[in-house]
Amino acid sequence: MKKLINNPEFVVEEMLQGMVKAYPQYVKKLEGYNVIVRKDAPVKGKVALVSGGGSGHEPSHAGFVGKGMLDAGVAGNVFTSPTPDQIFEAIKAVDGGAGVLLIIKNYTGDVMNFEMAGEMAQTEGINVASVIVNDDVAVENSTYTVGRRGIAGTVFVHKIAGAKAQAGGTLEEVKAVAEKVIKNVRSMGMALTPCIVPAAGKPNFTLADDEMEIGMGIHGEPGTMRTKLMKADEVVDHLMSKILKDLPYNSGDEVAVMINGLGGTPLMELFIMNKRVSEILDQNGIKVYKTFVGEYMTSLEMAGGSITLLKLDDELKELLDAPADTPAFKQL
Amino acid sequence: MKKLINNPEFVVEEMLQGMVKAYPQYVKKLEGYNVIVRKDAPVKGKVALVSGGGSGHEPSHAGFVGKGMLDAGVAGNVFTSPTPDQIFEAIKAVDGGAGVLLIIKNYTGDVMNFEMAGEMAQTEGINVASVIVNDDVAVENSTYTVGRRGIAGTVFVHKIAGAKAQAGGTLEEVKAVAEKVIKNVRSMGMALTPCIVPAAGKPNFTLADDEMEIGMGIHGEPGTMRTKLMKADEVVDHLMSKILKDLPYNSGDEVAVMINGLGGTPLMELFIMNKRVSEILDQNGIKVYKTFVGEYMTSLEMAGGSITLLKLDDELKELLDAPADTPAFKQL
């Protein structure tokens, strides 16, 4: 296992310490918990957004804590759901009196623990609502999921719901716009290589030197197809055909595009993917409103990427364009 | 070779096309040349900044083209200097009448070709100046270099000289502040794995499963030491001891820190590096003014990272803090 770490047991703790040292202007860590919150939390009168999940997906989610996006990112152990206690502490730390929205990726453990934490907070008089993101069109049900998995499309939920909250939306309004994003966002990914969970010390699956896996999840969950290496354009064609017909996205639609690297993929390859994505959208009469290329929802050092489309209307465009200032997502 | 590409011969061309499709609000490509320029180039009356080099270091340099940073990024083939013709076209495309500063990383081919292009432009009446970045303290002279190599510290030159130009500085002033950054910036990196140039199809060096290389260059040039795997803290201690005593950085100094991923390194590991960097700076009485953690100057899918320190004064702080809006570097 080749990793720049110290003790595999403490990677999450050390990572969060390093993050807070890097970005004191944005975030602080809750004493005794692996929870990152806005430096100015709680923001009085603003609906607070809490997300999180297993670690290993950085910059998700703590990297999106800041003005115009999340109020807290809860970091479980690597690829492991955070505990209800942790999430409960996050909710209490960021509640500014206007309620808290939990943005949960659809993994059974995450859903259970976030909802349990939400109930604990409700009994203390905090108004909590939640949404579940399930944008991955690859498979129904999977290793850690009943239903579809939540992957990179979650970042659009953070951005847009975060902008609505920043603009003074009520909990009901912020939840409604988050649901609208979830209804209109679809993703699918693929992997060239596995990744190694530090505490495990070896890959949780193997891919031969001439193989790739299509539809793989961000924890290495099996995808739809294991195949010989294909050209980037063929891979993109396959992913896009699944994504486009799922919503479906139609001629005349306007979309935001996210080309997300899984951690080990050079930016060069993500841009090559985007070239083909934009050609396909053009051929289908779908207009690209804005594109994001980079690492948003990773899987440690896994090589591969995912494509996300979000169908936009005027409300979503305005919120997508609103300023954001967080360690990993900035918009002027 | 596991890469999301189509034809290894066309990776740079396809990458730039995908980039322009992703970021039309920021950049355009010069017809017939692998050169990315600001969408609104030339900016009348502003000193223009041109940088570039071999491809494979994305987001360097085209990712930093935009308001407050570069006017053009010239993209050579992978790990290959751009041609004088290409650079000449870039200079002509961005000159807004106030002159052009070339920011060159210290590799023999880059220096030769940028300077030749500068001379070509001078004969056409364009006022051109240049600076050479040589921030890598690892080795004197190397595979492609006489003197020290230019690595991630170059991004601080882009940011600060870019802010000076955006603020209306003259060519002389912009060059002077770029030189001040170069005088005060030092970096050093290390690699856990090699990378593969697409057209070569195999790694240009090998590292055993239990080996790392300290001081390695961003093209895989040999470093100072090949060693068994060490803990992150030990690696950082070694890099920091070389960097700190080079300038030297002293108690009471204030610095900007960049923890740069080489392409295949999870953000988790970069934050773990930063934890140790901040501890060492603290122990040495050196104050951290601002930290940047992410991928700025990569080496395709190489796993590893580099540390950069920039000693700041009031002028550099103000320019570092100035807004920037580019695909890969944004500051509100």
Image (tube, coloured by chain):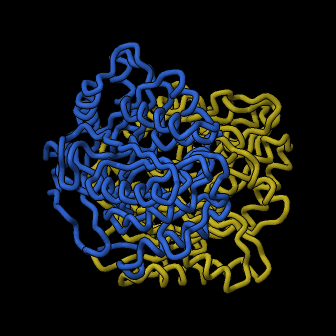
Chain colours: A yellow, B blue
Decide which of A121, A332 is in the foreground and name it: A332
Decide which of A50, B307 is in the foreground and name it: B307
**Viewer can see residue B298:** yes
Task: Name the residue rendered at 39%, 40% in the picture.
Answer: B153
On the picture, is B212 further left or further right than A144? left
On the picture, is B298 further left or further right than A53? left
Relative height, residue A271 to residue B60 (above, below): below
> How many numbered discs?
0
**Viewer can see residue A1:** no
Task: Name the residue rendered at 35%, 38% in the picture.
Answer: B307
Task: Name the residue rendered at 77%, 30% in the picture.
Answer: A96
Percent x, y of residue B279: 36, 24
On the picture, is A163 further left or further right than A228? right
Percent x, y of residue B184: 38, 29
Relative height, residue A145 to residue B212 (above, below): below
Percent x, y of residue A272: 49, 73
Decide which of B308, A127 is in the foreground and name it: B308
Percent x, y of residue B32: 51, 76
- Identify the image quadrant of residue B4: bottom left
Task: Name the residue rendered at 60%, 52% in the picture.
Answer: B66
Decide which of A123, B165 is in the foreground and name it: B165
- Identify the image quadrant of residue A209: bottom left
